[in-house]
Amino acid sequence: MSWDVDLAKELKKGRNLPQYGAVIGKVISVSPLQVSIYGGRVMVTSTNGRTAVPMYKVTCLHEEDHQLETDLSAGDEVVCLPAEGGQFFFIMGKL
């Protein structure tokens, strides 16, 4: 093979992520929600993930003042389940 084909194959190897079932993620940020998985190689955010169970509750302090509360904190571990194809993740809950 030529050097360019070999190089392309090596570059492609680095992009392949393992195809697991559920993975453990680490909460980086609560608002907006960001979860790090695969050792920090992938960040799950609102664009490529969704919580499967409500992790926030709304507290109404006054008629026009609402506040979101959650028991998640930065550094918490959560279970993430990839959808078919591995491009979208469901955040199942806190460990």
Image (cartoon, grey):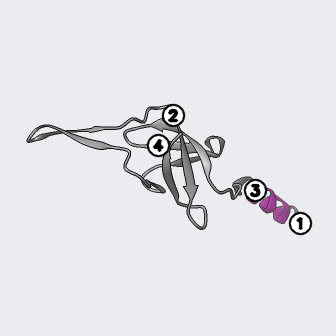
Looking at the magenta stretch, what is its main secondary structure? helix
Q: Residue at x 44, y 36 (%)?
A: 29
Query: Which stretch did the figure color magenta?
Result: 4-13
Q: Nearer the viewer, mark 4 or mark 1?
A: 4
Task: Determine which residue is flagged by label 3.
Answer: 11
Q: What amino acid type should be assigned to the residue bearing mark 1?
A: Ser
Q: CA distance from mark 3 to mark 4?
A: 27 Å
Residue 10 located within the stretch drawn in magenta: yes
Q: What amino acid type should be assigned to the residue bearing mark 4?
A: Gln
- Label 4 sits on a secondary structure element that is strand
Q: Nearer the viewer, mark 2 or mark 1?
A: 2
Task: Determine which residue is flagged by label 4.
Answer: 34
**Contact, CB < 8 Å: mark 2 with mark 4?**
no
Task: Determine which residue is flagged by label 1.
Answer: 2
Q: CA distance from mark 4 to mark 1?
A: 41 Å
**Contact, CB < 8 Å: mark 3 with mark 4?**
no
Q: What amino acid type should be assigned to the residue bearing mark 2?
A: Asp
Which quarter of the figure has residue 84? bottom right
Task: Determine which residue is flagged by label 2.
Answer: 76
**Disc with the residue nearer the chain's start (2 vs 4):** 4
Q: CA distance from mark 2 to mark 1?
A: 47 Å
